[in-house]
Image (cartoon, coloured by chain):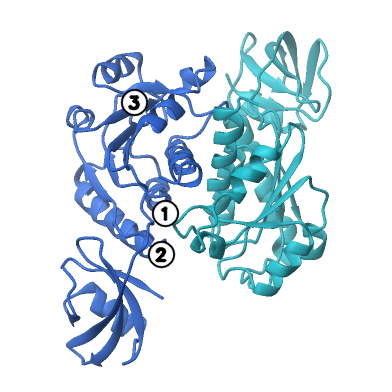
Chain colours: A cyan, B blue
């Protein structure tokens, strides 16, 4: 069943109008007919199965059949702070991170960030938000990850309960327990923030500043991962610890 | 330092000739001069630091300075059996799986595989092998993953010590312990094979046949992952268990 996200609370019926993307996608793209069922998620992450009972050219009515209870979100809210990367790699990073359960993505310019979106920034963000929405629908999430672009100092000072910075040197020094240790300390509902350097890596000064801001350096295993791969490894590792092992 | 893979055993010196990719890349692309150092990995995964001591237009000589001991390969050999996916997603899947430590990738046609490489197959494989080589260099691996294309029945009957099949229904049934259980049973040096269905999913008949061939169904957490994302989640989970936790 296809899943749609609505920017409203869901009651007994859902009224769709042609100005909504959901209307366009369900009625025009997927050509839903009366009787077609779909899943709808509301602003409170309430998930329901709805059936199309009325389909006009300007509006449509969906009758709510039942509410579903699904535990599909990571128990701990993971924020990834990353630098934009070249080509379309930021696009697919957002798609994959959404599939893997990220709660929030903060894009920011770091010392060695080479990509400069300049005036394109708003357009880029809108595109990434669309990618996240589609990935959230496809992976049957209950939440569409937030995506923000902000100044580095603001990014690293955002509220968090746990902070880590992926630091290659830590891996080289054989320091690989931090990710596990901090992950196992995290409690359901807390904010777990991990920062990843750009393709050129983080400067020693940035690492120092991050330590002061509450980001502990953590290795991600013995292999060198690309800027866009490391966050996906981290999300998968956290899912392994929180969802497969502890069954949080 | 850049890392190169050689199809030979390394002794006290390394002789490069212009017909070799390594010669072309080191001398022409990276314009190495006498005194330039690089890392070289031989056919036995022996890693050395070498210094360019002679650079001609047709040949070059590298003096081996020291051997390095690095533990960068997953302790258990992971084979991924996958179906080709659309667009360039097979390309980046191979790149990411290589970064994440895959030992071997077997591409095969499954019941619902839509992609048909046809006559392009050899060309596609050559391209994927180049992507794997570059990713292995960049992620500082000691091994370039093997990539094969074979018939489905041959693929599922290849030797293995442990076999899993990623099965969405398992996740839905809340069956999420199998991946962990089997991973924890695996011993260093063993062959751990995981099969992933195509975009359309596996048929019930395929699942039955896979059970008979020694592939246990395993869930990968509560979210629906795309065909090319699930194997990357699995590699990351296995690295978490074998490298971060057990320190195998």
Asked where in the image residue A11 lies, by quadrant, the reply is: top right
Which labelled disc corresponds to residue B99?
A: 1
Residue that appears at 34% across and 65% down: B69
How far apart are labels 1 and 2 at the CA level?
8 Å
Dot 1 falls on a residue whose secondary structure is helix
Any part of residue A92 in sight: yes
Name the foreground residue: A15 vs A215.
A215
> Mark 2, residues whose alpha carbon is within 10 Å: few (<14), some, or many (≥20)?
some
Q: Earlier in the sequence, mark 2 or mark 3?
A: 3
Q: Position of residue B33 (x, y in %)?
A: 33, 91
Q: Say yes or no: labels 1 and 2 on the same chain.
A: yes
Which labelled disc corresponds to residue A78?
A: none
Residue at the spot of label 2 = B138
Is B218 displayed left or right of B221 in the figure? Answer: left
Dot 3 falls on a residue whose secondary structure is loop
> Mark 3, residues whose alpha carbon is within 10 Å: few (<14), some, or many (≥20)?
some
- Disc 3 is attached to a residue of which chain? B
The reply to whether discs 1 and 2 touch (Cβ–Cβ < 8 Å) is: yes
Residue B192 position (above or below residue B164): below
How far apart are labels 2 and 3 at the CA level?
34 Å
Is A216 displayed left or right of B149 in the figure? Answer: right
The reply to whether discs 2 and 3 touch (Cβ–Cβ < 8 Å) is: no
Q: Earlier in the sequence, mark 3 or mark 1?
A: 1
Q: Position of residue B163 (x, y in %)?
A: 31, 28
Residue at the spot of label 3 = B112
């Amino acid at each position: 069943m296809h899943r749609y996200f609505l920017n409203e609370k869901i009651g007994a019926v859902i009224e769709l109008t042609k100005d909504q993307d959901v209307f366009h996608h369900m009625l025009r793209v997927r050509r839903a007919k009366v009787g077609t069922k779909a899943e709808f998620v509301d602003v409170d992450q309430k998930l329901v199965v709805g059936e199309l009972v009325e389909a006009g050219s300007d509006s449509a009515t969906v009758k709510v059949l039942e509410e579903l209870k699904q535990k599909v979100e990571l128990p701990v809210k993971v924020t990834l702070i990353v630098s934009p990367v070249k080509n379309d790699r930021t696009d697919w990073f957002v798609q994959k991170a959404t599939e893997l359960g990220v709660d929030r993505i903060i894009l920011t310019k770091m010392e060695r960030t080479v990509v400069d979106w300049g005036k394109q920034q708003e357009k880029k963000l809108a595109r990434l938000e669309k990618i996240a929405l589609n990935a959230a629908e496809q992976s049957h999430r209950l939440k569409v990850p937030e995506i923000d672009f902000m100044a580095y100092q603001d990014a690293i000072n955002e509220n968090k309960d746990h902070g880590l910075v992926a630091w290659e040197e830590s891996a080289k020094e054989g320091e690989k327990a931090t990710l596990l240790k901090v992950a196992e300390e995290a409690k359901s509902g807390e904010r777990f923030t991990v920062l990843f350097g750009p393709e050129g890596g983080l400067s020693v000064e940035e690492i120092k500043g991050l330590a002061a801001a509450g980001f502990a350096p953590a290795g991600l295993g013995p292999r060198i991962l690309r800027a866009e791969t490391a966050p996906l490894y981290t999300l998968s590792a956290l899912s392994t610890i929180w969802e497969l092992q502890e069954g949080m």
